[in-house]
Image (spheres, rainbow, N blue to C red):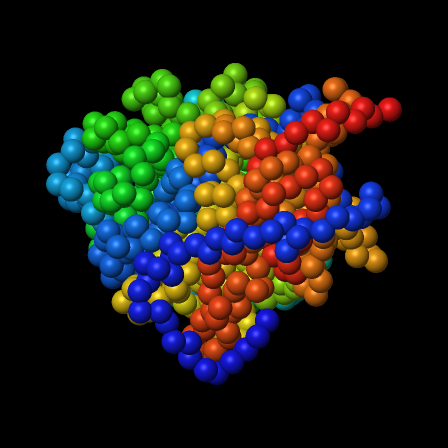
Amino acid sequence: MASSNRAKSHRAAPSKMFFATIIFLAAPAIFAQVLSKSSPSIQVDITPSHMAKTLVPTEALGAGVDRISTASTDKVFIEPVIKQVLSAGWQTVTYRQNTELHVEAWHWNPQGTWSDPAGKGYFTGDPKPGEFLRHSFGYSLPHRGFTRNEGTDANGFGRMTDGDENTYWKSNPYLTKAFTGEEDSNYPQWVVIDLAHSHLVNAIRISWAEPYARRYEVQYWTGENNPIKQPTKGAWITFRGGFTTNGSGGKAQLQLNSDPVSVRYLRILMSESSNTCDTHGSTDRRNCAGYAIREIYLGTASADGQFYDLIRHTADPDQTTTYCSSVDPWHEPTGIQNKGDQVGFDLFYTSGYTRGLPAMIPISMLYGTPEDSANQIAYLKARGYPISYIEMGEEPDGQFMLPEDYGALYLQWAAALHKVDPNLKLGGPVFEGVNEDILVWPDAQGRTSWLGRFVSYLQAHNRLADLSFMSFEHYPYDPCTIQWSDLYDEAHLTSHILQVWRDDGLPPNVPMFISELNMSSSSGESFVDNFGSLWLADFVGSFFTAGGDGLYFFHYIPETLDHGCGSSMATFGMFVVDKNYQIKQPTSQYFASQLINLEWVQPGNGVHQVFPATSDISDPAGHSLVTAYVVRRPDGQWALMVVNKDQENPHSVRIAFHDASAKTDSAFTGPVDMITFGSEQYQWIAEPNAGSANPDGPPAKSQITATPATTFNLPKASVTVLRGHITNSKVPHS
């Protein structure tokens, strides 16, 4: 990676920058050489029974549109920006739902009705089309129990340690018998307290709100690890005095143990509600379901009755950390968060970003209501907007939700949505980007796999048919630790996690989508330097070769550069833009996107066949330096996307196609298109408060007249697409 303090002078004609191509028509000797049979090679297995997958670009190669700055909406939803974004070639779009990460209710339509005539409570959007929906916003939840979760470290605070007895946490009423039809004990709710360090504890004081818990347990964590992050590295043990079977609410003080116990993490596990009504009254049964806590005090109680509290009570993120199982979606109009725009559906669908293709749409499930979600889909159908799939909620693992709780909500929402249209394809759970199975506290059978238990839950309720697809995110790296050698891991990480989900019991007929992807959940310099292009190509190829069904690059809409990791600023997106969101130049992932979408696959809705390929080029440690991904296109051409991860050396390779069933070899013959993008075409120039690329593309294009003996040159640190026809060499295999 090069660095420089010099600013790059940009081209005067951006259109030439994005659409120019360089075509070399030269003698084959310039681009290829004849080597012996011992030369490095790429072996392509074209045995029909070994085909890994089929893919249709308009359905399988997509990008994601997320919440953006409200101030940027009018600047990025304009024809010149949209045209340049679409030139990357991504097809179908997924609408990302960010409000739930911030513990907010989503008003997808600002027009609607409140459950309370006073204009507050549970909001239901209007299903009838009216004013053009250009913006939509989230609303903070006043009964939130999180100090922080995976999306809210710096946003808001929990209500159980805020020092205010007039506020309270309340659990989600849709997880009670009134809505599930099952006993509350099937869906116990909980709160966890993190004291930051181990302290001696023997007493707790709980200031209950309404409804309170009649039956509950107070427990401590035995492991040295965080029970939220590492839920199988310890166990919850109930204090000797931690059982309450006939609670009466109010301010309850429990002597947990005769002698103080060293504790960092404590859990209150609630399994029977009083079903008394909260401060919002008795007219809505949701106000009278679940559990509510005003404030928690934890520490030691002396023999003379003195209580020594360890909790930090403050209305900011410095409060003692609390986590919770769920949150009541009750809210008020004053909670609007209008600096972040969940782009209005009318603008989203009519802008051009969707290309008129069916889009994957989310509904707000963790902090919403079934009626509101049903109205959302009814609105889209009334407008005639095409929907491919519906994602149910957003990252329940990041909200620390147990799979049975998510399952209970899933079935209620599925029933409401299928009343609107029984043919809707629903799915999730929209996991955070992970490389390993998601584990949770063991259930009564000792099962710890989140997805495994969710699938079992649907099966037990005879509702597995309501799961039309499984979706998750892919962010494999910590941005501050990315090294070039991490490129060696991507193909394995991708194939491994897909196999994990199948091993968890996901049926083979349920497709898997990565509905949000990039290298990390926080941007860094690797996103915009050449590493980003090689990673993206390697990921896309390995995903389909491993059996994945569809993917969505993140983030589609241009964003400003931001401080991340490295010696200059970076972005999730495919373009460098100025403060007014005017595109200055593309990043490396833009060019990789073009290679994938416009060169490797044949644009359109034709069926492509994916076949496996291997190379014998590796480093002394055994890492594969060259990986190749192969499709047979609808036009009859074979296309290889080859990634040379060697930073220092080019490699010349022979390419052989083998059909084991016919016992024959084939090879490229005749014209072969060669499109290369790498360190010779693109170099990121790091700057402390900016950054730019020089050179900044485009890919080099050439054409070779190939024979079975031709070798192909792969420049160092590059992605190369080779595309042409193959001829059977009629050399039988023994």
| Total numbered badges shown on the rendered structure | 0
Q: Quadrant of the N terminus?
A: bottom right
Q: Residue at x 71, y 55 (%)?
A: 651
Q: Residue at x 33, y 53 (%)?
A: 84
Q: Residue furthest left?
A: 131
| Front-lying residue, 479 or 464 | 479
Query: Residue 320, how many percent across, how many down?
Result: 50, 63
Query: Residue 265, how many percent across, how many down?
Result: 61, 56
Query: Residue 674, how many percent across, how many down?
Result: 56, 48
Q: Residue at x 59, y 46 (%)?
A: 704
Q: Residue at x 52, y 16 (%)?
A: 462
| Front-lying residue, 590 or 435 | 590
Q: Quadrant of the C terminus?
A: top right
| Front-lying residue, 665 or 233 | 665
Residue 250 vertical placement versus 452 (above, below): below
Residue 381 vertical placement versus 694 (above, below): above
The answer to whether residue 101 is seen in the rendering is no
Q: Residue furthest bottom?
A: 5
The answer to whether residue 350 is seen in the rendering is yes
Residue 395 vertical placement versus 458 (above, below): below
| Front-lying residue, 97 or 534 | 534
